[in-house]
Amino acid sequence: MFNRSYLNFNYLLSEDLPPSTSTHSNNTTDMTSRPDLPSATINHLSINPDQGCFAVALDTGFRAYNCDAFRQTMRRDFDTCGGIGLLSLLFRTSLVFLVGGGAQPRYPPNRVMIWDDQQNSFIGELSLRSEVKNVKLRRDRIIVVFLLKISVYNMSNLKVLDEIETIENPKGLCEVSQTVTPMVLVCPGLLKGQVRVENYACKRRKFIMAHASQIACLAMTLDGRFLATASSKGTLIRVFNTMDGSLLQEVRRGADRADIYSLAFSSNVKWLAASSDKGTVHVFNLKFDSPSLGSSSTLMSQPNLSNKSSPISTLPFFKGVLPKYFSSEWSVAQFRLREGVRYLVAFGREKNTVIIIGMDGSYYKCQFDPNEGGEMTQLEHFNFLKPEEEAS
C-alpha cells in the first residue's frame, strides 16, 4: 500500500468553502470546466451526509450541485477520455475524493485521488491493494470500503487507524456520524442480515440482527444515534437505536420484493424517506421520541388508527391470525417516478420537502402534507446535466 499526501490539507477542513467554478485548466490533470461538452453517462451519484449537496461521477469528469436551492457549484471535464466511478465531497469544502470507473476508468479502481478544486490540483492519494467500493468522509477521517473490509484513515496524514472485516459488501454499504467525535460507524457484519455498530467514543462494538436476508441499504442520523436498514427483500424498513441495538420502529414499503436504493432521515428525525426500483418514493412518519434514548420508553404509544399521518391496517382483531402485512405501518406520502431508474432521496431545506435525484439526470423537489398525506406535490423538475433547460 502506498499513501501519499502532497501537502498538509488540515487548513482546508476548518470551514466550508464555496466550491470553485473557475474555468482554468491544469496540464498535469487535464481538467477543465467546459460547458460545450455533450451530455455524459452517469456512473455514480452521492448525496452529502447533511443533504445539502450532491455529486455526480461521469464518464467525462464530475460535477456537484446544491440540493436546495438547486444550482451547479462545481464542474470538471477531462480533456482526454476517462471516467469517474465514485465521487465523494467533504461537506462544502473544495476537497473531492475520486475513484476511476465506467467503461474507460480515468484512474485505477484501487486508488482514491484527492482533488482540491480551489488549488486546481491533486493534493493526495490512497493507493490500495483492492478495488474500492465506496468512500465515506468526515472532517477527521476517510473511510474506504472494500468488498470484504473497511479501512479507516486519518484525514490529516492518511495513516490507517482501524480495519473492519465485513461479509461480502458489493454495494459498499457504510455510514458514519458527522456531529459527534469520536465517530459512530455502521456497516454490514459478518453474518447475513447483520449490522455492525462501532462506537469509537466508548470503544464499544455492537451487532444487530436487522433482517433475515442480506442488508441492502443503510442510513444513519448525523449524530449517529439512529440507524435505518432495509434488506434485499425490500418490503420492510427498520429503525434501530445504535447505542443499545433496540428496534424502535418498523415500516412497510410494500408487499412485493424491491431493491431499496436510498434511505434518508429528516434533520428533526420526524420523517424517513425511501426510494426503490418500483419507482415510488415513500415518506414514513417516525414515532419514537428522538431526544430520549436507551429504554423502551423511546417507543411512543400506538397511534390513533383514524390518523391519516400514520396509515396502519384497521383490522386489529385479526392480529395473530392474518399475516403481519395487515398490521403494518405504511408510508404517509408518496411520489411516483419511472420504474427501474435509480433514484436517491434527501430532505429539502423547506419544511416537508423532499429532494429526488436520478441516474437519468432528473432532479425533483416535492412537498408532502404531514396531516393529510397522499401524493406529494411536485415543486421543481430539472435535468441536472442540462441546467440551462427550463424547469417543468
Image (cartoon, grey):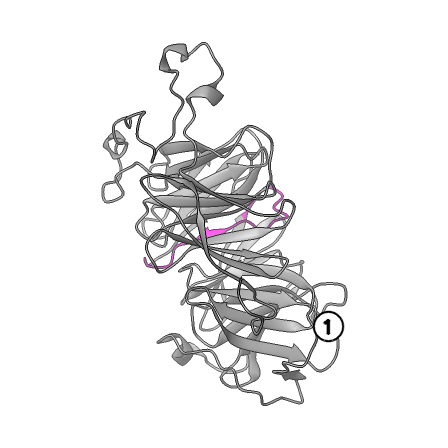
Using the image, determine if residue 247 lies above or below residue 105: above
Q: Is residue 303 magenta?
A: no
Using the image, determine if residue 50 lies above or below residue 241: below
Side (left or right) of 101 relative to 379: right
| Residues drawn in magenta | 165-180
Q: Residue at x 50, y 69 (%)?
A: 65
Q: Is residue 169 magenta?
A: yes
Side (left or right) of 32 relative to 189: right
Picture quadrant where residue 243 is located: top left
Which quadrant is home to the N terminus? Answer: bottom right
For the image, the number of numbered tags is 1
**Residue 187 appears in the figure:** no
Q: Which residue is mark 1?
A: 82
Residue 103 coordinates in the image, percent (x, y): 76, 63
Residue 178 coordinates in the image, percent (x, y): 37, 59
Residue 44 coordinates in the image, percent (x, y): 62, 60
Magenta highlight: main SS: loop
Using the image, determine if residue 330 lies above or below residue 386: above
Which three-letter amino acid code belongs to the residue tagged 1? Gly
Side (left or right) of 379 relative to 104: left
Residue 136 coordinates in the image, percent (x, y): 50, 59
Q: Residue at x 61, y 82 (%)?
A: 33
Q: Residue at x 60, y 78 (%)?
A: 76
Give the structural element (helix, strand or loop) at label 1.
loop
Report the front residue among 57 and 285: 285
Report the front residue among 112 and 372: 372
**Residue 84 appears in the figure:** yes
Side (left or right) of 257 relative to 274: right
Q: Residues within 10 Å of mark 1 (few under 14, many from 20)?
A: many
